[in-house]
Amino acid sequence: MVAPKDILVFWQTHSGEKSFCNLTLCYHFIMPKKIVSLFFLLLTPVIYCQETTQTPVAASLPAREARPSEIYPVSIEYPQEGVTLPAGIKTTAVFGAVSNPASSLTINGAPVKLYKNGAFLTTVPVSLGDFNIVAQVSDGVNTYTSVRKVKVDGIDVSKFADAQFDITTLSPQTDIWALSGDSVPLSAYGTPGAVVTATISDLKDAKEIVLPETEPGFYNAAYKITAEDKTKSSKIIYKIYNPQTKDKGKETAPGRLKILTDKDQVYAQVNALYAGTRMRTKAVPQGNLFPFYRLYGDLVITGLANGLYRVSLDENNTGWIEDAKISFTKKPAAPNKIQTVTAADQGIKTRIIFFSSKAVPVLTEGTPSSFNVTFFDTATDMPVIETPVSPLVNNIVFENAGNNTVKFYINYNDGQVLWGYDYAYDETGNLVLDLMYKPVLNPQPYKPLTGAKIMLDPGHSPRRKPPYDGAIGPTGFLEYEANMKTAKEVAELLSKTGAEVFLSKNEKEDLNLQGRIDRALKTGAQIFVSIHHNALPTSVDPFAKPRGFTIYYFNQHSKTLADNLNAAFAKNVKLPNNGTQTGDFYVVRAPQFPAVLTENAFLMFPDQEDMVRQDASRKAFVQAIYEGILSFYGYKPQDLLPPPLPKKPVKSKPVKSAKPAKITPKKAAHAPAKTAAPAQKPKPKADSPYAAPEETNPADFNGLNA
């Protein structure tokens, strides 16, 4: 008998995964008289499979669409192959689907729950650098393995020398300008467990400042500038000492510190291309924008950090602006002066003009009963305020609100509501403000929204390869598809109300955000509803709290529409209600009409993706948007239904009797039906914007600041 022989066999799984197996054949050679008996027909092979070193990349939507006939035992839609996840994260969401919902799934060894259609969502701990997300799915017979390769950004301080900094993390990386009373941030990233100090040269009280270690390798502190501190260009020097190895290190931050004094007055002007730009609440390149401040004209600069300049509008209002948006100038000649304020009815709106000497920064604020405008860099002399001639505006009140800061309160008449607004400076420096009235509808029997113009905006655009434009679900359902399907179905329902309904784009268009607003203004849309489906940033745990639908608005006059939509969602959609919230999204910032954005569901959750994907369950979202818009206008779905037809009179039957002579005539059991009254026009509910008296006819808005 000879030893068993190993035969290398190649096989392929349903997913296209290629593996090699050792097929061990046990057989005998019987050699008496050189007669060999070979029992191949009776042999029982023992098979064991060894994973190939090239485990296949986990499939995703583009791969499946490229090979639609292929069966993929497991797919991962997020995170995408080869992406870099942000520094500092400890876990990431992972979602996708298996082809056989009866299978079992593990990711990096941990079991994962499968939804009824095979979709899944889980979280996976990650580590710095190249990282593999290994998915194994088993159907009880075969086990299939796929890998999603990603990278986690950041620096592994455990690999640092005994006393070392990452110089790219030393603060400041760029020059700082600061005032007395400001705090200078001190931060470093280096060898864990060390003692770290910072010294600001030229400042006697800023020597050897200890930076506590807030996380392994992260050291943070701050120094508050005093009135005695003076410097034109101080270095910030960091030292590190490792008490275990006794090693030391020292680095100097790239940026320098300058402390501004009363003599260091710095002035700038907003570049014409950026007139009306917004300020940031922090010195960061993205996000953190003040909602309603707009910058024009001359500015006072009182700081510099991270390449952004601090703008001081007055003693109580400051923000940050990018270097590219301003040009440095000499001290302005004089502050703005507002001489006269007028308010006149123009049929569809009230136009208010602040006759001024120059354009200056402004702050606008809407309330349910007034619209307020604050002017900065403006003399506090009382202007002439003419009596408003307007069905909307009752009066205009002036207030001194600070150093060269004035505020106007534009108060509404009782029962009046603001529909939208727009403003811009004209060529002479006068601020022209338009306050729009609510449009007049022409309700018809069973078509109560006749005269209404509604724009539905299916968010995002068709892009079927990463990076996607919008969210994606575990089975590869893209957000733009969900948004378009929902918008079309809502439009179909709304068209039966008598309203004129527009979609901002079609299925194939890649239209930018301003293009959508431009189309709304061009069509004369009276409300704007942007339809979306939600996602979460990588750093957020999807299971940290209930996730469902949210309705966002930006301007005060859009809140009523948002509240009506949220109430309709709560009635129709069986998901967590994340409420009505303010959101600084581009399309809802449009001030000319009520504008909202719906986040119907979280596509990353398997059950919610399935609700949106299936025609039958998607009707709940469609009905919610439809009813929310109807309710905003003051109506219910019943107002579209004609009353039931009157029943035909029932004839009485003669009573049979054994004694015909005693039969007496019977009166009819029912009186003849009365003629139906003519159909009445439906009336809006009392708490609708349409319950107030109608004043004007609708028309297109001129779009001062579209």
Image: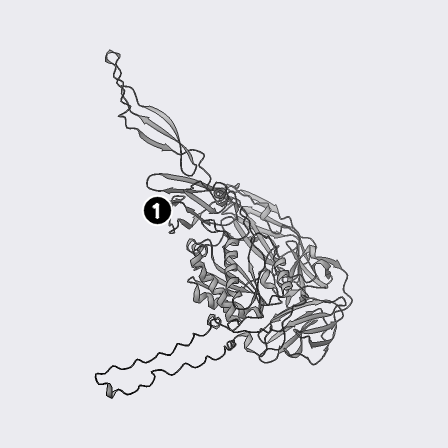
- Give the farthest residue toward the front: 661
**Which image quarter: residue 18?**
top left
- Give the farthest residue toward the left: 658
> Which quarter of the image is occupied by the N terminus?
top left
Question: Can residue 563 be seen at all in this image of the molecule?
Answer: no
Q: Residue at x 53, y 47 (%)?
A: 464
> Which quarter of the image is occupied by the C terminus?
bottom right
Foreground residue among 648 and 121: 648
Foreground residue among 641 and 107: 641
Q: Answer left or right for 204 relative to 54.
A: right
Question: Can residue 682 be seen at all in this image of the molecule?
Answer: yes
Q: Answer left or right for 364 relative to 493.
A: right
- Give the farthest residue toward the right: 333
Foreground residue among 119 and 176: 119
**Which image quarter: residue 283?**
bottom right
Above/below status of 68 relative to 656: above
Q: Residues within 10 Å of mark 1 (few under 14, many from 20)?
A: some
Above/below status of 283 relative to 566: above
- The number of callouts visible is 1
Find disc 1 in the rendering and name its residue.
102
Q: Residue at x 41, y 50 (%)?
A: 120
> What amino acid type is highlighted by mark number 1?
Ala
Above/below status of 473 relative to 491: above
Q: Answer left or right for 289 relative to 323.
A: left
Residue 280, how many percent across, how many down? 62, 60
Q: Residue at x 74, y 58 (%)?
A: 328
Q: Secondary structure at mark 1?
A: loop
**Which image quarter: residue 289?**
bottom right
